[in-house]
Image: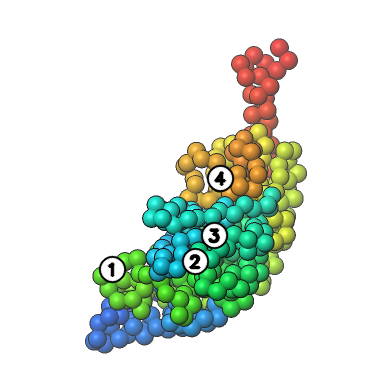
Amino acid sequence: MAIYLDHAATTPLRRDVLDAMLPFLTDGFGNPSSAHSFGRKARAALDDAHERVARLVNAEAREIVFTSGGTEANNLALKGAAWAGKARGHRIVTTSVEHHAVGHTLRYLEKFGFEVVELPVDRYGRVDPDHVDAAISDKTILVSVMLANNEVGTIQPVAELGRRVRAHKGVLFHVDAVQAAPYVEIDVETLGADLLAIAAHKFEGPKGIGALYVRHGTHILSQQQGGTQERHRRAGTENVAGTVGFAAAYELSCTDRPETVRRLRRQRDRLKSAVLAVDGTELTGHPKDRLPGLLSIIARDTDGASVAMGLDLEGIACSVGSACTTGSTEVSHVLTAMGYPEEEARGALRLSLGRTTTDAEIDEASEVVPRVLASMRLGSVAVAADPLGQGVGV
Ligand SMILES: Cc1ncc(COP(=O)(O)O)c(C=O)c1O
């Protein structure tokens, strides 16, 4: 049986969540905009999902906009706030380690005259709140910082950043909480967020459903036209079953969180000790302020993609950086921003545990991963010493 250590990419759908969704994929198929009984039933489920998700992040139901996932939630937040705020200013402040759903969206906005300031991070991937403060000018309309990084697991000092941004009147604070949501408590008041993105498939909910928290009174321009759904902020017939699944999965995830976090830390630390015992390996990301189940490393003199492939052959599924960069030959912009030279960044590997990871799987991975890493390192070191294959020492 293969061992799945790629929970940062996505997670399996929880059985209880599927059971909660099924009625709305079968008999309860109505369109929430229909006035008849089928529509009313769907509307009630959708309203309930808004309420439940809002409660979990300390918000109000009207402040939750369901989207097709994390990417769309981030796009809607950034483009929606940028266009709505264009008359006030054109400057947007962010970090150099954001997910492409944020980074590429902001690059797109640059084409329309917005100025994007990308702040540097330290060796652990953290942004300095003083830098954020200093980057905010009277032309700044928006600051966007992720809660936890998807490649190295580093948690940003978001509550502190929120306080700083709040002190600048009229500047909105957007938080990409997609990777953090299963493991970090989200309270939009404590974080000081005006806009915050989450996706259900990161916490054993269905794919294709996300949510954007939009603080009451925050004006964003809808990015889709053709309907008045989600209080005019996201046109299109709602994915009712998806929203029900989102609410159910997030409730279960939040209830289980303390126990899950404790267990994941223990399992991750066990795997970490085994992996870092291999010569030439190094942990990437913050040593303490990091997601509990995410183990990201660099193994010198290896190519992360080849290691991940070698592990797959041995029945262990993991990834190089984020799922989104798999298949690309580009080195991670996150590791580059953290100061790793390109040749080191090529040896990146991400093993991400989840709620369903068992101790037996970690026992097995603690044997297999170091063995594969060591053999790959030996292979490449031998090739480097003897590039023509004439035999080392000849
Ligand atoms: C930090 C972060 N933001 C955004 C996304 C995109 O979310 P989705 O895959 O739901 O579109 C991801 C997905 O990995 C992520 O990790």
Q: Is residue 357 above or below residue 243?
A: above
Q: Position of residue 154 (x, y in %)?
A: 64, 58
Sequence-earlier tag: 1 or 4: 1
Q: Which residue is mark 3?
A: 93
Q: Which residue is mark 4?
A: 332
Give the residue type at disc 3. Val
- Dot label at residue 71: none
The answer to whether the residues at label 4 and label 2 have Cβ atoms under 8 Å apart is no
The answer to whether the residues at label 1 and label 4 have Cβ atoms under 8 Å apart is no
Q: Position of residue 172 (x, y in %)?
A: 51, 70
Q: Which residue is mark 2?
A: 141
Q: In the displayed orientation, state which residue is furthest to the front.
A: 138
Give the residue type at disc 2. Ile
Numbered disc 4: secondary structure: loop
Instruction: Judge by depth and name the residue closer to the eye, 166 or 140.
Output: 140
Instruction: Judge by depth and name the residue closer to the eye, 65 or 13.
Output: 65
Instruction: Judge by depth and name the residue closer to the eye, 220 or 20.
Output: 220
Sequence-earlier tag: 1 or 2: 2
- Dot label at residue 225: 1
